[in-house]
Image (cartoon, coloured by chain):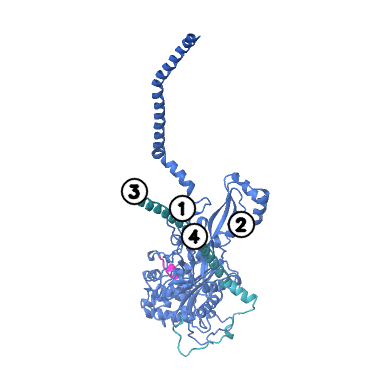
Chain colours: A cyan, B blue
């Protein structure tokens, strides 16, 4: 009887300790998850800002202004345009 | 001595014995009673704590170790047909404080002012301005806010907000619209698609440790719902082209306003919709409401001659005339009852084709008067006039098409050339899809559509083709709009120069317009241009609006890689002054 009791006590202590460690583990992992999610949110924010930046820099109005004023480019007039007919009618270019 | 001593002792001993025997009789019950009372009170207290006051204590307990966190959900983006962003939300922070709880050392305040790019005096003024609550900075970059919060000033708080940015600025302002406070759509697509775009922030409860870090999830109270992205039918490149050309024309002719619409013939998608005047949605504090109106959809005008092809189409479809039927338009005026209608230039006998090419009011009126008014009404109605175009834009107007029963002959005659009826520019562009296709009216939409969209048949295919031919003649020498021609492409269209209606009569101010499509051999785009009150450099549709059409159509077809259908030396401009002018 005493032996059984001792055995059960040992099992109980082991269970209790494993509960404590798993609990600790869970919290530690949770904190890590939180941090990772925070980083992910940060990246999402940055992605949004980069998208915004991309479309702001790439807006046709700005591109044209730079092309005209800084690079001194011009739209070719029809007199300076040559249309090249392709052998097969490119019906697929849509 | 001894007995005395004994005598003295005796009574004393006896007295002691009596005390031991007598006192316990009362003491035991008292002590017992007191202890029992203590136990009862403990039980009562624990019952009270455990069952009666439980809620308060629980909430106090959880307030100390758990916290509700908001899970942000941001608003969906609005993108153009190729995914280019037209409206994006980015997270920003706002700093706020309860003025009576705000405590800072002068050094902290100076540091804060430096971070926020202001002065300590201004911060103090802000705090003094309102007793209850004060924003110290609104919608600032998260990094700036983090630096301010790092000063750990007592009573300074930050909150998450989103700010909406519109990279397209004034070019796409009228289509996209903007959001107001709390990310709620206030104008344009932002308003119309609020449900689709808006995110619903979620909330969850976590257990926190002493450093206020979440250590365990307790419950998700509400799952966040991110806003969905929305793809418009707009093509950012064409939109810019349309805007640039429209603005140039409005400037050149010192006009009051203008509008330009590009429609995809196959799908009815609106590829570009430009308006002038416009505004910058990113900085709209002092913008007049007037500039925010999407005139192409929310304003109506009398279209003038651009409506003539519909009159002709109705007569052709009913078999009343044929393209080569001759109509006598001399002497260039026509009197109906008490009213007289005029042609800008008196012509003689014209074929139906020439009535369109030279835009004869008398010719169109004569053809209209040969038709039952119901037939004409039906033509206009089936082309989408008098009904809202259903593009999905808030506040779009239907225009006015009066019931046929109420038309008097003079009204039927003027309606033949677009007076006494009002339309918006998108309606007009959309109506021209019946000539650009073989008689099908396409639904106009602002949203990205996949593939071919079936239209509603309005005209017989041969009627549509006949009118298309006439419209191509308009852009040839001898027509009203040779300036609409495009290098390398055949184009077709119709000019309009309508007197503006004000109060009860017509004024000498004009609406100049041109609606057309290209390439004429296999139309891909419908382009409608409207210039409101040009005051310099002419006012005829062929002079003011047609060149805009030419520039926009040429540019758009090249950008879309549409194969040319004419030789590059196709543009034939008549010598100066050789153009046919028209009015209405």
Q: Nearer the viewer, mark 1 or mark 2?
A: 1
SS for callout 4: helix
Check the image and report above or below for B537 versus B53. below
Residue identifier under label 1: B206
Q: Are marks 4 and 1 in contact (CB under 8 Å)?
A: no
* Residue closest to the eye, A44 or B403: A44
Which residue shows up at 49% across the image and 60% down it? Answer: A32
Where does the magenta region start and end?
B407-416
Residue identifier under label 2: B147
Q: Are marks 2 and 4 in contact (CB under 8 Å)?
A: no
Check the image and report above or below for B450 versus B102. below
Rounded to the nearest angstrom, the CA distance separating label 2 from label 3 is: 65 Å
Q: Are marks 2 and 3 in contact (CB under 8 Å)?
A: no
Residue identifier under label 4: A32
Q: Is residue B422 left or right of residue B243?
A: left
Q: Residue furthest left?
A: A1
Rounded to the nearest angstrom, the CA distance separating label 1 from label 2 is: 26 Å
* Chain of the residue that carries numbered disc 4 in the rendered image: A
Same chain for marks 2 and 3? no
């Amino acid at each position: 009887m005493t032996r059984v009791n001792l055995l059960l006590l040992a099992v109980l202590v082991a269970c209790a300790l494993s509960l404590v460690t798993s609990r600790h583990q869970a919290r530690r992992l949770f904190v890590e998850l939180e941090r990772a999610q925070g980083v992910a949110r940060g990246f999402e924010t940055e992605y949004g800002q980069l998208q915004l930046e991309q479309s702001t820099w790439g807006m046709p109005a700005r591109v044209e202004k730079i092309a005209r004023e800084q690079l001194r480019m011009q739209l070719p007039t029809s007199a300076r345009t040559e249309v090249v007919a392709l052998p097969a009618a490119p019906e697929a270019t849509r | 001595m001894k007995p005395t001593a004994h005598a003295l002792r005796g009574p004393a001993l006896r007295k002691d014995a009596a005390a031991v025997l007598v006192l316990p009789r009362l003491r035991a019950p008292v002590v017992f009673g007191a202890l029992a009372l203590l136990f009862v009170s403990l039980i009562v207290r624990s019952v009270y704590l455990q069952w009666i006051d439980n809620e308060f204590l629980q909430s106090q307990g959880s307030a100390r170790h758990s916290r509700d966190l908001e899970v942000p959900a941001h608003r969906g983006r609005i993108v153009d047909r190729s995914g280019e962003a037209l409206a994006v939300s980015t997270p920003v922070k706002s700093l706020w404080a309860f003025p009576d709880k705000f405590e800072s050392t002068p050094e902290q305040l100076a540091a804060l002012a430096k971070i926020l790019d202001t002065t300590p005096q201004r911060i103090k003024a802000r705090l003094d301005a309102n007793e209850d609550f004060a924003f110290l900075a609104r919608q600032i970059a998260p990094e700036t806010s983090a630096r301010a919060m790092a000063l750990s000033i007592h009573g300074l708080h930050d909150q998450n907000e989103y700010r909406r940015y519109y990279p397209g600025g004034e070019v796409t302002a009228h289509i996209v619209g903007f959001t107001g406070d709390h990310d709620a759509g206030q104008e344009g697509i932002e308003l119309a698609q609020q449900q689709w775009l808006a995110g619903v922030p979620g909330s969850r409860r976590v257990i926190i440790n002493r450093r206020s870090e979440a250590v365990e999830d307790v419950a998700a109270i509400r799952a966040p719902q991110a806003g969905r992205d929305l793809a418009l039918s707009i093509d950012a490149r064409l939109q810019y082209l349309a805007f640039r050309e429209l603005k140039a024309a409005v400037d050149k002719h010192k006009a009051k306003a203008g509008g330009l619409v590009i429609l995809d013939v196959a799908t009815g998608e609106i590829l570009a919709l430009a308006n002038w005047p416009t505004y910058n949605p990113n900085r709209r504090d002092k913008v007049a409401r007037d500039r925010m109106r999407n005139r192409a959809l929310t304003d109506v005008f009398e279209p003038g001659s651009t409506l003539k092809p519909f009159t002709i189409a109705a007569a052709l479809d009913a078999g009343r005339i044929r393209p080569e039927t001759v109509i006598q338009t001399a002497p260039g005026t026509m009197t109906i009852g008490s009213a007289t209608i005029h042609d800008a230039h008196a012509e003689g006998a014209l074929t139906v084709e020439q009535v369109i090419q030279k835009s004869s009011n008398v010719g169109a009126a004569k053809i209209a008067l040969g038709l039952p008014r119901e037939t004409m009404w039906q033509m206009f109605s089936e082309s989408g006039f008098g009904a809202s175009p259903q593009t999905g834009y808030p506040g779009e107007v239907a225009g006015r098409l009066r019931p046929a029963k109420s038309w008097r002959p003079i009204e039927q005659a003027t309606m033949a050339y677009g007076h006494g009826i009002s339309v918006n520019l998108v309606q007009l562009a959309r109506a021209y899809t019946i000539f650009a296709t073989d008689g099908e009216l396409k639904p106009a939409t602002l949203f990205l559509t996949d593939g071919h969209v079936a239209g509603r048949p309005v005209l017989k295919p041969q009627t549509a083709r006949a009118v298309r031919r006439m419209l191509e003649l308009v852009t040839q020498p001898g027509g009203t709009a040779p300036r609409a021609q495009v290098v390398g492409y055949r184009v077709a269209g119709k000019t309009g120069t309508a007197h503006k209606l004000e109060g009860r009569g017509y004024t000498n101010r004009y609406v100049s317009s041109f609606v057309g499509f290209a390439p004429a051999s296999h139309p891909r785009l419908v382009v409608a241009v409207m210039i409101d009150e040009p005051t310099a450099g002419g006012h005829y549709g062929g002079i003011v609006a047609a060149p805009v059409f030419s520039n926009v159509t040429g540019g758009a077809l090249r950008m879309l890689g549409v194969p040319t259908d004419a030789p590059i030396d196709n543009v034939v401009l008549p010598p100066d002054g050789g153009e046919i002018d028209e009015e209405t």
